[in-house]
Image (tube, rainbow, N blue to C red):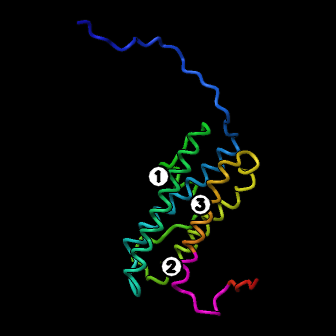
Amino acid sequence: MATKTAPKSTNTKHASAPAFRASEKLAGHLQQLLVDLTELSLQGKQAHWNVVGRNFRDLHLQLDEIVDAARDFTDEVAERMRAVHVTPDARSARVAEQTTLVPFPDREVDSAVTVDLITAALYATAGTARRIHDDVDAEDPTTADLLHEIITRIEQLAWMVDSENRVANESVPPQINA
């Protein structure tokens, strides 16, 4: 009985003709979003480990929800980058160098302060997605759909965590009545 062997490599270059390839501008926009989402997940964990004070347990659990969403979106953005032939870079040095988020403290943080800091990080991340949206949409509406999902969820999480510190009918921004 003859044994089958795998065919030998022909050492030929793999060539493909992708239907779409991101421009440098699109690549840069997606890289920025990847970095900010990565930093959001890291800050969420830093907060999770170091939050103390009132409503600790609920906030501790809510921070895990934020981290999970940020990590999921980080993976989706990185995989979308690969699909449009961009190499994602979320190494720690790149994230530290490129993030637009304000650093999170390296110590215990009161729960009310944590709420404010994480809310700011969430809105900053959503702000990145909103800032790049129109350019992304003009070049690749499919990727813009991913931005819609990210903006929707990140802003929902910001509203939810921010509500921990709000005072009914006194906190800004004022409600728009339709």
Mark 2 → mark 3, Cα distance in angstroms: 20 Å
Q: Nearer the viewer, residue 89 or 142?
A: 142
Q: Secondary structure at mark 2?
A: helix
Name which residue lies at 57% across and 69% down: 122
What amino acid type is highlighted by mark number 2? Answer: Val
Q: Secondary structure at mark 3?
A: helix
Mark 2 → mark 1, Cα distance in angstroms: 25 Å
- The answer to which of marks 2 and 1 sits earlier in the sequence is 1
> Residue 74 location in percent, x, y?
51, 54
Secondary structure mainly formed by the magenta segment: loop
Name which residue lies at 63% across and 89% down: 171
For the record, the magenta segment spans 159-172
Placement of the C terminus among the 4 image quadrants:
bottom right
Placement of the N terminus among the 4 image quadrants:
top left
Name which residue lies at 68% across and 83% down: 173
Location of residue 24 (image quadrant):
top right
The residue that disc 1 covers is: 92
User: Is 170 in the magenta?
Assistant: yes
Which of labels 3 and 1 is toward the front? 3
Q: Nearer the viewer, residue 142 or 161?
A: 142
> Residue 77 location in percent, x, y?
56, 50
Q: Is residue 160 left or right of residue 142?
A: left
Residue 150: give its label.
Answer: 3
105 vs 167: above or below: above
Residue 41: give its label.
Answer: none
Which of labels 2 and 3 is toward the front? 3
The residue that disc 2 covers is: 115
What amino acid type is highlighted by mark number 3? Answer: Ile
> Residue reaching furthest top?
2
Mark 3 → mark 1, Cα distance in angstroms: 22 Å
